[in-house]
Image (spheres, coloured by chain):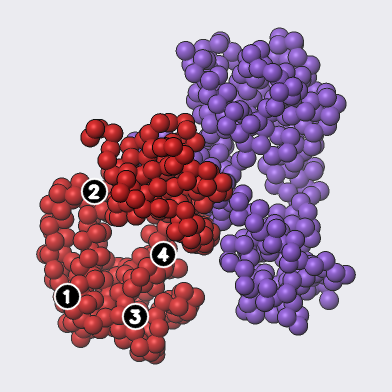
Chain colours: A red, B purple
């Protein structure tokens, strides 16, 4: 009973966001946790009636937990049972995090998506499905809010980004577990999920239950829906801002240059996004925080002479706002 | 020491949002709680150096709590001590809530703002100051998120709305209490704040402390800042949508009418806001929820034939989306 309703629900998500075109060949990212195991089974079920196929699984051994070997073995045996090939690699997440000064979580994510890309190429997959749920969506929204993000970024997890698709974004973790139990399937419990020093776990096990108690019901659905709407607003504003950025930004030997007066006449939501785009273009892949946008705004409005940001330095020079690569301390 | 920094901070808020023009005559809404007592003292202090004056206080006795009489007496005595007149009225919040099928909180808020408007008129005040803090802002954001609001509405509490101003929006409740303690001032503790069946209290005493524990610091500031940015985005989108609404909406005997094709070609963030504006114009003062916008969208996209909403009915008729006053059940 759970199964049938759940399959319908996932099908609706696929339709709503046009996630899987006919003829798609899908790689499934598999950690061995309930979400990705359910994703694998659900996509196999949908593929039977659908016009796409699951061509391979892919598991990255993060070598972080003592149980990492067991998780890998679990994934390999699932792949055998399902008659699907599986790509497996091991990654030195700790080493990479140290070398790139990233958090373990950020380093793991980056290495995971790179691995998935390689695995998709190797298996001839056209899309890669990952198992993020409505609960992940709600947790991500709260984490971003607590870091004070604005609408951009508040949209949380996207149903599709490039060739990555997330068919489970409208489904709760509990629904997936009921589905697995109903089908007598097992999964790996990640014992590190109980560690409350990890912000996401604290949100999951403490903050959201308190929110649920406030209205006596699940708030994840409402939070995820709010994230949807913010993503909708944010995406459109991002598009508008990208077009304005193309028009207003000049690239010189000094860096990225704007006419200050032109930038000041943009509405604030667009102006802030233009500053963000400049920093992203200047140093792709670096995390840009709200304070770095604030810094650019302050310089633009002559409230500060210059401001160092991780990607360089904002400076106002003869009516032009300049984002240069050199930073104040290097002078 | 607290006093001086706090006065500076409030002055910055006044400047940033241009809250008090020169020559303004201000009425202060006074409940007797720490926020509004501090507001009264701070504005008096700022008025000494500023170019505005505090002309009166105003207290509405909500007749809800057994201590309502004590609260009123406290406010009257503060007004005497400060040499400021005070307008006092009593309201039958319970009766009004029942008559209008509103929550006690909504009924109290509506009666309070109406009273403040009358009191401002009577005292010749040009602006009315109320004591909302950064904590109120953070709590409101979370409450709205849990009800699944989108960007509109997520902006939370506005620094200014019409003649209502909120000079304490950048200040925390704790800062205000330290200020009062430093000045040996007292205030009324609202014992109903401890009632955890009230959603706002639960957010205040349970959810936000759990969020604080997640990163080991105050999250209210980050939440309030996120609300600022969402308000900025939302306000601009609201303005764009209002202009499009004027262009696209026709008012006929049937109700508010749109060309469906024109509405469908609007970007989603604008289209949703146009539907909201239609419902607001159709029945001013009614609470419109996200589901009522969803209902309009579903009808527009032919996913439903018609949909009843509190303000009437959405229907698609010969290529036109109509919001009519009659509802399905009245046929």
Judging depth in this view, the residue of A273 and B81 nearest the camera is A273
N-terminal of the pair, mark 4 or mark 2, is 2
Give above or below for B76 relative to A60.
above
Mark 3 or 2, closer to the camera: 2
- Give the position of the C terminus of chain A as an image quadrant: top left
Q: Looking at the image, which is closer to me, A177 or B75?
A: B75
Label 3 marks which chain's residue?
A
Where is mark 3, residue-wise? A43
Marks 3/2: CA distance? 32 Å
Q: Position of residue A270 (x, y in %)?
A: 51, 52
* Relative to A153, residue A6 above or below: below
The numbered mark, 1 or 4, whose residue comes first in the sequence reads: 1
CA gap, disc 2 and disc 1: 25 Å
- Disc 2 crowd rating (10 Å Cα; few below 14, some 14-19, many 20+) is some
Q: Going 70% across and 27% down the picture, which residue do you hit?
A: B21
Give the structural element (helix, strand or loop) at label 1. Answer: strand
Point out which mark residue A103 bears: 2
Q: Are marks 1 and 4 on the same chain?
A: yes
Residue B113 visible, this orientation: yes
Task: Please state the horizontal and vertical placement of residue B45, each as a whole percent of the image.
Answer: 63, 14
Distance from Cα at disc 4 to Cα at disc 3: 19 Å
Q: Nearest the camera: A230 or B194?
A: A230
A243 sits to left or right of A322: right
């Amino acid at each position: 009973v759970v199964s049938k309703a759940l399959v319908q629900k996932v099908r609706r998500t696929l339709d709503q966001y046009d996630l899987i075109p006919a003829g798609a060949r899908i790689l499934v990212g598999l950690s061995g946790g309930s979400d990705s195991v359910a994703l694998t089974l659900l996509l196999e079920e949908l593929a039977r009636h659908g016009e796409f196929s699951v061509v391979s699984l892919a598991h990255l051994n993060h070598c972080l937990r003592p149980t990492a070997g067991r998780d890998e073995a679990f994934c390999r045996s699932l792949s055998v049972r399902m008659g699907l090939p599986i790509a497996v690699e091991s990654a030195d997440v700790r080493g990479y995090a140290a070398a790139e000064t990233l958090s373990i979580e950020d380093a793991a994510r980056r290495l995971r998506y790179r691995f998935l890309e390689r695995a998709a190429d190797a298996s001839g997959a056209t899309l890669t499905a990952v198992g993020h749920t409505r609960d992940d969506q709600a947790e991500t929204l709260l984490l971003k809010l607590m870091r004070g993000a604005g609408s951009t970024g508040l949209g949380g997890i996207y149903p599709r980004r490039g060739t990555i698709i997330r068919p489970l974004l409208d489904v709760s973790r509990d629904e997936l577990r009921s589905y697995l139990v109903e089908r007598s399937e097992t999964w790996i419990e990640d014992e590190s999920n109980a560690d409350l020093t990890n912000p996401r776990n604290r949100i999951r096990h403490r903050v959201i239950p308190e929110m649920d108690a406030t209205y006596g019901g699940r708030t994840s659905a409402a939070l995820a829906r709010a994230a949807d709407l913010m993503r909708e607003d944010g995406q459109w504003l991002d598009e508008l801002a990208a077009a304005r950025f193309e028009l207003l930004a000049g690239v010189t030997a000094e860096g990225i240059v704007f006419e200050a007066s032109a930038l000041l006449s943009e509405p604030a939501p667009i102006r802030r996004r233009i500053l963000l785009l400049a920093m992203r273009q200047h140093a792709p892949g670096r995390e840009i925080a709200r304070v770095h946008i604030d810094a650019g705004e302050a310089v633009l409005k002559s409230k500060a002479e210059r401001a160092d940001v991780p990607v360089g330095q904002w400076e106002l020079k003869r009516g032009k706002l300049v984002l240069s690569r050199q930073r104040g301390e290097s002078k």
